Image (cartoon, rainbow, N blue to C red):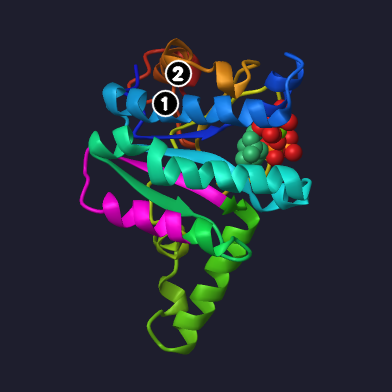
Amino acid sequence: MQDVPNHVAIIMDGNGRWAEERGLKRSAGHKEGGKTLEKLALYAKKMGIKILSVYAFSTDNFKRSQEEVDFLMNLLIYYFNEKLDKVCKEGVKIIFSGREKPLREDVLKAMHNITQKTINNDACILNICLNYGGQEEIVDASLKIHEDIVNGTLNPHKLNRDNFYKYLYQDLPPIDLLIRTGKEHRLSNFMLYQSFYAEIYFTDIYFPDFLETDFEEAVAFFKKRDRRFGNVKTNCKNSANKL
Ligand code: IPE
Ligand code: IPE
Ligand code: MG
């Protein structure tokens, strides 16, 4: 039996389809998804999860209509400035992962404000991946590594898979449990480096409908996994495991 996962990540997908199936505009789905995110951050704290990473907007989501992108950016500002107040008061530290460019000034400002406001919180961490791409993160890390080698602060022979994390957007431990809502079974460029041994949980539930019991079910799935990390089971009495 595994303990509660230390780092959980969620690909919050299915807002648009949630709305379309109800004859509503996609924006209604995003609004409803925002409410779910607020609740999940509090459930995570309650369950003893230390880090929750959420995929809020990918670098590829800029391919969507200007109207949808603008709606999402305004919604995010509203959440950072007002709606996440309870989460902040509960001691959750909010941090971000992703590229700044081409985010709008007002979005960057709201991100900066909520980061500063929660900088000393230590109940748990909410890592919001905004204008985030997993391949972009690895490319950006490679550029920082190159810089450190050139300025002499990094000996390239000392670089390994553990200290590589220092060059990512945030130096967080690897993901233990990765959840994707909304029927699709793919990573969509999310935290490729950090999910190397993540247990992956797919659910058909659209993100706005993903509630506390669904989160608990995902954690229960995780607890039952036998994580071997490339090794074989230790203390196994089964002779079939012997060479
Ligand atoms: C996820 O929901 C939220 C974002 C990508 C911002 P979608 O907007 O992708 O919803 P579907 O997948 O179209 O239903
Ligand atoms: C992934 O969902 C991005 C977020 C949840 C923010 P998408 O809806 O963008 O992914 P695809 O296009 O279905 O792969
Ligand atoms: Mg989607």
- The amino acid type, in three-letter code, at marker 2 is Phe
Q: Which of marks 1 and 2 is in front?
A: 1
Question: What residue is pinned by disc 2?
Answer: 215
Residue at horizontal 47 percent and vertical 18 percent from the top? 218
User: SS of the residue at dot 1?
Assistant: helix
Q: Is residue 44 above or below residue 126?
A: above
Asked whether residue 243 is in view, the answer is no
**Quarter the N terminus occupies:** top left
Residue at horizontal 65 percent and vertical 16 percent from the top? 204
Q: Residues within 10 Å of mark 2 (few under 14, many from 20)?
A: some
Q: In which quarter of the image is ligand 1?
A: top right
Disc 1, disc 2: CB below 8 Å? Answer: yes
Give the x, y percent position of residue 197.
Answer: 50, 38
Residue at horizontal 32 percent and vertical 30 percent from the top? 49
Report the span colored magenta: 109-130
Give the x, y percent position of residue 89.
Answer: 24, 37
Magenta stretch holds residue 50? no
Residue 40 is labelled as 1
